[in-house]
Image: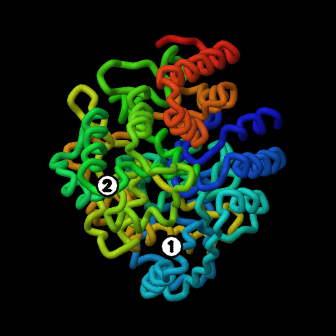
């Protein structure tokens, strides 16, 4: 119990979670980041308490085939279960798509093929907390977007879709919610990590080629300031959670190494050192520092407006924003100039190559406590949503389905995934974050906000780097972490 509660302190939307015997699960859901760390901790404690008394002996094989519930692979859409009668409930966080009728429209299309499967929905604003509080009751419905839970607890709450190998034939990120070789979560859309920009603003500023290095990016921001009335880089400082987006570029994007983030970082003596070539964590955060120091952000960063900025970038009042690809659809829909919204690779080049990472947003989970009929109906519904609804494409997301049409393109960029933690070290990053209080790749919005504050105050950037390094080294010493890099 004490260990679970200690680890709960490190939980947030973009983090690596895991458990012995189940590998690790990597979560990159942006919407979950809107909840504060305090909220996540409170809810995670509730889950940890419930897990102590929950029956964790659920066997993945007997929760599907042996009970007559099909696996994801076994469902043939449009052919199987078209006469199944069931009423299922789906909990989700997409209040905007509930309000604008998108979800009702998708369910109506689903019912053209499956007329007897009734899908009831509940859109929840404070989803991250509410979902965690309801989860241990087992009486929350049939399908939910999986909140932050340890990988070892997945079989306690959810039905497996099939083995990782089976699911890998159908979806991207099949191993993101895994335990004992089984897949427990299927994303509704994927997020790629790049940078939002307004094409018309770039053209007016005379920026004819997308920047590929930090120096080129700062030069582009300066050109926007000199030649247009647009804000070069909108920080979204006041929203808080948006600041955590900067951490999403750590790893392969900044280092060209898919093992750096989840395997090497904890064992690295100076993870923030200056590589001297515009790469690494040093270069990543210095982009933000330099933008602030050079006056290339909004006049008063404390008054940024998350909802208002959507229309502002659509109308050409903002040049760039650092957010995942999930934000593209929102910015395009915020005004009459959606065609001006572009998404480019993050401006760091490693050995002549640019990288992008991608991962799932919230993932569908099916309630292990539902009846077999409802589990089957839920399996059919989830597969239809992923393969046939077109929702991922509508949101401009990185594709989840390996067969559904997609227009997502990142020209000249290699899309990779950061590899998961080494066996036996699944929770080490959480422990390092808790000990160092840096919250790296863990919704560390306050640390990134501090970069803006210190840059505005004139604090030398290298002083900040030295502070981070000292905290990191102290945490390694305290936890007895071997330093090998």
Q: Which mark is residue 360?
A: none
What percent of the width, then of the height, locates residue 408?
28, 58
Q: Is residue 80 above or below residue 25?
A: below
Q: Quadrant of the N terminus?
A: top right
Q: Please state if 294 lies on the left or on the right of 181 as rendered.
A: left
What percent of the width, then of the height, locates residue 94?
55, 69
Q: Which mark is residue 197?
A: 2
| Nearest to viewer (mark 1 / mark 2) | 2
x 65%, y 19%: residue: 475
What percent of the width, then of the height, locates residue 412?
20, 44
x 72%, y 39%: residue: 9
x 65%, y 62%: residue: 127
Q: Is residue 236 above or below residue 278?
A: below
* Residue behind mark 1: 381
Q: Quadrant of residue 130?
A: bottom right
Total residue callouts: 2
Q: Please state if 33 lies on the left or on the right of 48 as rendered.
A: left
What percent of the width, then of the height, locates residue 422?
52, 26
Q: Residues within 10 Å of mark 2 (few under 14, many from 20)?
A: many
* Mark 1: secondary structure: helix
């Amino acid at each position: 119990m004490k260990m679970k509660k200690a680890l709960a302190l490190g939980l947030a939307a973009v983090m690596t979670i895991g458990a012995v015997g189940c590998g690790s699960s990597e979560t990159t859901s942006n919407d979950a980041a809107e909840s504060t760390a305090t909220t996540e901790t409170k809810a995670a404690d509730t889950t940890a308490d419930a897990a102590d008394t929950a029956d964790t002996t659920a066997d993945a094989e007997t929760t599907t085939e042996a009970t007559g519930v099909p696996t994801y692979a076994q469902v043939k859409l449009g052919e199987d279960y078209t006469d199944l009668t069931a009423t299922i409930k789906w909990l989700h966080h997409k209040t905007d798509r509930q309000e604008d009728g998108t979800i009702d429209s998708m369910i109506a299309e689903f019912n053209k093929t499956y007329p007897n499967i009734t899908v009831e929905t509940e859109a929840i604003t404070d989803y991250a907390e509410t979902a965690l509080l309801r989860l241990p009751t087992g009486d929350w419905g049939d399908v939910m977007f999986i909140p932050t839970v340890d990988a070892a607890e997945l079989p306690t709450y959810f039905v497996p879709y099939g083995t990782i190998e089976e699911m890998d034939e159908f979806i991207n990120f099949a191993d993101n919610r895994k335990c004992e070789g089984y897949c427990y979560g299927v994303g509704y859309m994927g997020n790629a990590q790049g940078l939002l920009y307004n094409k018309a603003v770039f053209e007016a500023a005379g920026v004819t080629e997308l920047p590929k290095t930090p120096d080129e990016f700062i030069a582009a921001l300066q050109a926007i300031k000199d030649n247009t009335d647009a804000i070069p880089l909108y920080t979204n400082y006041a929203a808080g959670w948006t600041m955590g987006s900067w951490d999403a570029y750590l790893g392969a994007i900044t280092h060209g190494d898919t093992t750096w983030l989840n395997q090497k970082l904890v064992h690295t003596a100076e993870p923030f050192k200056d590589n001297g070539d515009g790469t690494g964590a040093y270069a990543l955060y210095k982009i933000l520092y330099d933008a602030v120091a050079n006056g290339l952000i909004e006049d008063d960063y404390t008054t940024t407006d998350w909802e208002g900025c959507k229309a502002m970038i659509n109308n050409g009042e903002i040049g760039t924003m650092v957010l995942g690809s999930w934000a593209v659809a929102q910015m395009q829909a915020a005004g009459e100039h959606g065609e001006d919204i572009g998404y480019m690779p993050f401006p760091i080049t490693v050995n002549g190559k640019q990288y992008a990472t991608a991962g799932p947003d919230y993932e569908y989970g099916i309630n292990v406590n539902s009846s077999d009929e409802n589990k089957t109906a839920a399996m059919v519904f989830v597969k239809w949503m992923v393969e046939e609804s077109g929702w991922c494409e509508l949101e401009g997301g990185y594709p989840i389905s390996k067969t559904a049409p997609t227009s997502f393109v990142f020209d000249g960029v290699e899309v990779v995934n950061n590899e998961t933690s080494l066996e036996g070290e699944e929770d080490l990053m959480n422990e390092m974050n808790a000990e160092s209080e840096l919250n790296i790749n863990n919704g560390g919005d306050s640390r990134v906000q501090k970069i803006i504050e210190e840059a505005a105050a004139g604090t030398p950037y290298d002083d900040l780097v030295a502070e981070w390094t000292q905290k990191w080294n102290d945490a390694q010493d305290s936890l007895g972490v071997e330093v090998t890099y």
